[in-house]
Image (spheres, grey):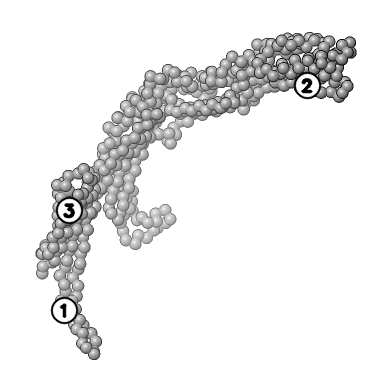
Amino acid sequence: MSITIGSLVLDEEQYAPTSNISFEYYTSDSGEIIGGNIIAKITGIVSVSDQDGSKTGSVVMSRLALIRKLGSSPKCVVTTGIPNFNPLGGKARITNVTIDQGPDPSWVNQGAYSIELRGLISSIPSNSFGITAADGVVELSRKESITIGEDSHGYVYDEVNGVSKAFIRFSNSISLKCETYCGSTNTTISVLKRLVKYGISNSKLITLYGAYKKYLQSRSIEIDNDGSISFSCDMILLPPTSIGTAFVDLIFSYNRTYESKDITYVTSGTVTGLVNIDWGDLVTLVSTCSVSKLANAMGTFTKVRGKYEDLGSWAGKTLELNEKPNCPPTNNTNIGRCENKPEDGNNEDSNYVKPSSGTISVSRTDGVINFNFEWSTTQDSSGGTCIKDGIKTETTVEIIEPQPQYVEHILPGRGTLIQNLNCKSAKKVNITVATSYPEDNCGNKTKCTTNDGLAIAINQYVPAKALLIENTTTETRNSYTIRQNFIECL
């Protein structure tokens, strides 16, 4: 038997080769065969007769050197003469060469060797992944899921129906590893592209929604040097009649501070642009280069902002705690509250809630827009802190009620004599209104705001018959303060 490996011929007389064939298969998590190798192990003994005399040892060494040199090449070689060894494309890679140094003097005229060759098996059984033997797949894991009606997934903005829950999320993840053996004509990326397209089109989960429109929400690809790839994507599926442009998440929050009477309404959200994509284009996204997720996000945000930038469209809930002293809890679920007011957000303080801030942030890379609209108390009903257009006004009222009057007489050698005058001091009201404003604001507007706050406090706290006994004003670059003290006239 003569075996040819590349340019080396192992004839029976000089190399005495024998062969052993084995197979190695790779399976998926579900047990399907996704690839395999055919392995040939060639063993033999290089022998030389004694007819060459002293040259016998050198001949053995030269022939073994040819075998050793054959194993140093990483290239695939053509093999013939190996029984039942039919790798894909007729080529195999030498993966191991062993040369045994025998005992002297036997090793002078003979030397044992072994050669291991690996190639792709010529075919594998059909599988649900559409993988062939030429793909060289050695590891594969695929997971798919469909979620219907999950509230945590937010909303899709549909051009037909507006903000809608009529969508399905399809998630797909693949872990793949390929080894480019001899005869493999595909790269790992090309195998992944075909696997994604074939897998989704033949998915049992997606059968019912084959006619749905597909919108890419997110995807990621990780490639390692060892030939492995991890891929994942999330798709939004909409009914055939729908036109989706973005994924929308909305949050409405309400806050009330009872000590300061401050009220805050917030509408915030995230708009993530979507792009319509073909099933077979999830990896390279060639057909979507002209489509901008950001452009779709901007278009949707313009419509969402127009709907929710007004306080009248705030869609949250309010929970009011009834201000009763020493409220006795009736059970563990309502400790600290006695009564809930209607959750309609309409109360007397809402008249003082005005726009206070708006924030919009744009990520061009991700095609994501985050926004935050806030309305808060600009002047509460008690005449307290006022914040509007960057101007902050603080009103402080100090009331000194009438106090009994006494006179102390010091008597040398006897002590102190306290005399009650049988009268009380006059009631005093001290009012301080301080306004601060940004550097680029108008001072005249600040003075008007301060005077308005002073007028409210006088009307509410100063008695009808009172005498102004002190009036001071202090003005700096960004503040204006008025202090007026009154005394009640009887």
Query: Residue 219's mark?
Result: none
Q: Quadrant of residue 92?
A: top right
Alpha carbons under labels 3 and 2: distance apart:
99 Å
Which label lies toward us, 1 or 3? 3
Tell me the SS state at disc 2.
Answer: strand
Which label lies toward us, 3 or 2? 2
Q: Farthest residue in the front direction? A: 54
| Sequence-first disc among 3 and 2 | 2
Residue 286 placed where, x, y %? Answer: 44, 18
Residue 163 placed where, x, y %? Answer: 35, 30
* Three-letter code, disc 2: Ile
Tell me the SS state at disc 3.
Answer: strand
Residue found at x 37% / y 60%: 328
* Three-letter code, disc 1: Asn
Q: Is residue 160 visible?
A: yes
| Sequence-first disc among 1 and 3 | 1
Residue 54 placed where, x, y %? Answer: 87, 15
Residue found at x 76% / y 17%: 65
Residue at the spot of label 3 = 475
* Three-letter code, disc 3: Glu
Q: Quadrant of residue 4?
A: top right
Q: Are marks 1 and 3 in contact (CB under 8 Å)?
A: no
Residue found at x 21% / y 84%: 410
Residue at the spot of label 2 = 99
The reply, left or right, for residue 45 in relation to residue 288 is right
State the residue in front, 315 or 280.
280
Q: Is residue 118 visible?
A: no
Residue at the spot of label 1 = 422
State the quadrant of the N terminus. top right
State the quadrant of the C terminus. bottom left
How many C-alpha atoms fall within 10 Å of the one at disc 3: few (<14), some, or many (≥20)?
Answer: some
